[in-house]
């Protein structure tokens, strides 16, 4: 079993062949992390054994507790005071970092949030080499084509979406207006970064898709799932939910 007090240092990889960060322990063992925002989620799980959005969302006390325990071992710029999409750091531990032994598939909840559990007997698995999913954002040309094909609207709900920097303080329901580019078939399920596998979503719909994809137990991603290709289907494969009423607003797409 490992504890936060066993951590010697958290630092960015100095090896050009290895992308990301390392959490190094006093005995020399290291955990490899590719995404900075997943560091805090893993630290919460090491500290408490379980975690949810509330631990790192606005108004949390957990992040300051971890900062107090680790002091300068945890660089201040590695962790935010809180995370707007507070489920993503946890889900990416499972989906992208390869720590699939973190339990998030049994319907556990903390309040209204998905619960993630790191069992003591699985601590040593964190040090094993894990397959990392490589996620790449669309390039400028691809973004332009996606926006044009979707008339600058969310591919699910039809909301008019813009880049984050164009949102005003007075903009209502910002999560419905903020543009996010999504991999239709998630990279952890074999999705590529070609134009055909991207779609533009509002922040809210993207988060909702993540929450379902994250608990999907289908062996392969169903290309007929409404979350992947709403142009072709109205049914979400893992949940059998019908989102036809939501997609009705897409009728003005090209």
Image (cartoon, rainbow, N blue to C red):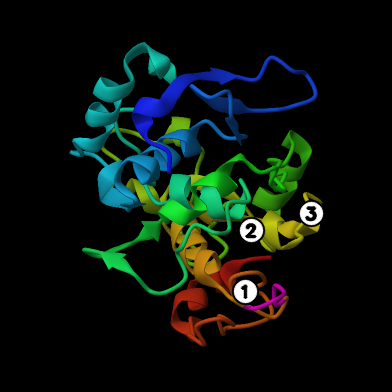
Residue 79 visible in rendering: no
| Mark seen at residue 230 | 1
Residue 175 visible in rendering: yes
Closer to the observer: label 2 or label 1? 1
Locate residue 144, reporting x and y percent.
71, 43
The secondary structure type at the circle numbered 1 is loop
Vertical placement of 125 versus 241: above or below? Answer: above
Vertical placement of 236 versus 14: above or below? Answer: below
Locate residue 225, reporting x and y percent.
64, 78
The secondary structure type at the circle numbered 3 is loop
Q: Nearer the viewer, residue 225 or 116?
A: 116
Q: Earlier in the sequence, mark 1 or mark 3?
A: 3
Give the image quarter of residue 11.
top right
Q: Are marks 2 and 1 in contact (CB under 8 Å)?
A: no
Q: Which residue is mark 3?
A: 192
User: Magenta span covers which residues?
Assistant: 218-222
Q: Earlier in the sequence, mark 2 or mark 3?
A: 2
| Mark seen at residue 150 | 2
Vertical placement of 184 versus 173: above or below? Answer: below
């Amino acid at each position: 079993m490992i504890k936060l007090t066993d951590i010697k240092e958290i630092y960015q990889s100095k090896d050009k062949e290895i992308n990301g960060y390392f959490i190094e322990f006093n005995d020399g063992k290291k955990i490899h992390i590719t995404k900075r925002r997943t560091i805090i989620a893993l630290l919460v799980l090491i500290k408490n054994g379980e975690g949810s959005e509330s631990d790192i969302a606005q108004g949390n006390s957990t992040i300051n507790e971890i900062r107090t325990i680790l002091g300068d071992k945890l660089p201040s710029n590695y962790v935010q005071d809180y995370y707007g999409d507070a489920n993503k750091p946890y889900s990416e531990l499972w989906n992208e970092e390869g720590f699939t032994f973190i339990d998030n598939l049994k319907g556990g909840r903390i309040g209204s949030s998905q619960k993630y559990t790191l069992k003591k007997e699985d601590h040593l698995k964190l040090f094993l080499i894990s397959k990392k999913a490589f996620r790449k954002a669309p390039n400028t040309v691809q973004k332009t084509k996606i926006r044009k094909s979707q008339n600058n609207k969310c591919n699910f709900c039809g909301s008019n979406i813009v880049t984050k920097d164009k949102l005003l303080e007075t903009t209502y329901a910002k999560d419905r207006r903020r543009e996010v580019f999504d991999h239709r078939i998630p990279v952890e399920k074999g999705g590529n970064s070609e134009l055909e596998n991207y779609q533009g979503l509002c922040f809210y719909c993207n988060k909702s898709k993540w929450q379902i994809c994250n608990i999907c137990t289908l062996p392969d991603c169903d290309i007929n799932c409404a979350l992947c290709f709403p142009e072709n289907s109205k049914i979400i494969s893992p949940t059998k939910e019908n989102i036809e009423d939501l997609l009705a607003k897409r009728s003005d797409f090209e």
